[in-house]
Image (cartoon, helix red, strand yellow):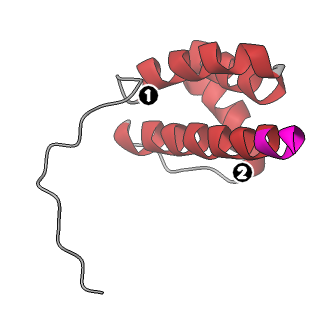
Amino acid sequence: MESVGCTVRYMYECMANGSMLNFWYRNNGHFIPRSKELLSRLVSLDNQLGMDAQRFFTAPPDERWFLAEKIADRTIGVHGFFEWESEPEVMAE
């Protein structure tokens, strides 16, 4: 069961990092390239970010979190958890 947990964690880490990279492209006025070109194009546009992203996707589990934080700092400017600032909504049953 532990391997399933690790697999799910890796899946969410990949989705989060992919979303941050897509945000970086849009925020910097670039189109989002095809998946197979996303990392190589990123290296040409921002070498450090591109190299960190490439390392993230091939890094062993114990190194990925550090790389994810570096990617977050460089793409969205923050990392970690934050308090939700809106009031809870009442949901219909």
Q: Which quadrant would the C terminus be assigned to in this image? A: bottom left
Residues shaded magenta = 1-5
- Which SS class for mark 2? helix
The residue under label 1 is 75
Could you say which is closer to the camera, residue 41 or residue 75? 75
Give residue 30's position: percent from left, percent from top.
46, 43
Give residue 42's position: percent from left, percent from top.
62, 30
Quarter of the figure with residue 54: top right
- Asked if residue 34 is among those painted magenta in the image, a careful observer would answer no
Q: Which mark is residue 35?
A: 2
As displayed, is residue 79 above or below residue 86? above
How far apart marks 2 and 1 lie (CA) works out to 18 Å
Give residue 15's position: percent from left, percent from top.
62, 47
Could you say which is closer to the camera, residue 31 or residue 21? 21
Q: Are marks 2 and 1 in contact (CB under 8 Å)?
A: no
Callout 2 environment at 10 Å: few (<14), some (14 to 19), or many (20+)?
A: few
Could you say which is closer to the camera, residue 18 or residue 42? 18
